[in-house]
Amino acid sequence: MNEINTIVSDIKKGNIKPIYFLMGEESYYIDKISDFIEQNILDESERGFNQQIMYGRDSSIEDIVASAKRYPMMSERQVLIVKEAQDLSRSIEKLISYAENPQPTTVLVLNYKYKKLDKRKKLYKVIAKSGLIFESKKLYENQVSDWIRRVLSGKNYKIEPKAAQMLTEFLGADLSKISNELDKLMLILPLNSIISPTHVEDNIGVSKDYNNFELRKAIGEKDIIKANRIITYFAENPKNNPLVMTISLLNNFFTQLLLFHGLNDKSKNSVAKGLAVNPFFVDEYFLAARNYPMRKVAQVISFLREADIKSKGVGANQTNEDILKELIFKILH
């Protein structure tokens, strides 16, 4: 986030690079930086003649270089944005000669999503010298809830921990999707609102009572009735509750529980830091640890691995519903 703020701040100050190579697994920040450049370097009156958008699948490196070498018309500079530049990955090294001597009046932006340049290659070194390379790394799921809170705080909103967890479990670590859903919530809720699980359920379609977060909690508490009620709901709504996601989240939970048992310092803050979880959820681990000693946790992890293999059609001929029911029974008994 600090690196992004620095890029934006430098552009606002007029410290503009001739090449911006935006790469990495997380497309959200690539789009944000590219959009900022598109909307802020040139005045609206200059964009008609001096701002061009090209697409990697429809262009060659030669086309891009030819456009980049043109002079601006009645403007200090031109902006050339290449979207989906990763489609040029096989020929991207051809950009070396231009990057060694970029046109000073051109701002060339390459959106190289889901891939990255090899730092050992000459192109990376040349662009790093003449321009700017930004790598957008994907967040781990345990970092997403904090990201949601930071984004909302910057826009004068807050969110309850459970609501943030619901969004994370439903949308994963895809920041673009999460951002779109947050925008929907902010459209209907007044400034300074606190987004609750009910808001998420009513406007995004995630059940506040029947989700993986609640299943994990029910299992931790050994609440057999609640756990079976949730998996029955999952069986009736399989598209919204894929088995692979449930197994993955339960595996994360029991792996964290294994780490919990191994912690020497079990103060609340130390547990939150050691497990990389919000302190709001720490009490759940204390309760689950009482219900699942270390030997049982290790056994549960083996159950989860077995269920994962079965869900992929290996060594069993069971429906996903049967696999999940069998898994939950083994965990709880």
Image: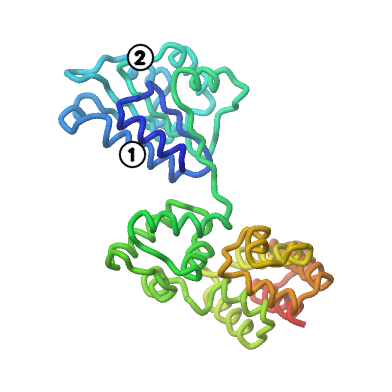
Rendered residue at 65%/71% (across/down): 320
Q: Which SS class for mark 2?
A: loop
**Residue, disc 1:** 35
The amino acid marked with disc number 2 is: Gln
Query: Is residue 209 found left or right of 318 in the rendered image?
Result: left
Mark 1 is surrounded, within 10 Å at the Cα level, by few (under 14), some (14 to 19) or many (20 or more) other residues, namely few
Evaluate if marks 1 and 2 touch, with contact meaning CB atoms under 8 Å apart: no
Cα distance, mark 1 to mark 2?
Answer: 21 Å
Q: Nearer the viewer, residue 98 or 157?
A: 157
Report the disc number at residue 103.
2
Query: Is residue 230 found left or right of 261 in the rendered image?
Result: left
Residue 190: x and y in percent read 27, 67
Quadrant location of the C terminus?
Answer: bottom right
Up-down: is 151 above or below 106? below
Indicate the quadrant where residue 53 lies.
top left
Report the disc number at residue 154.
none
Q: Which SS class for mark 1?
A: helix
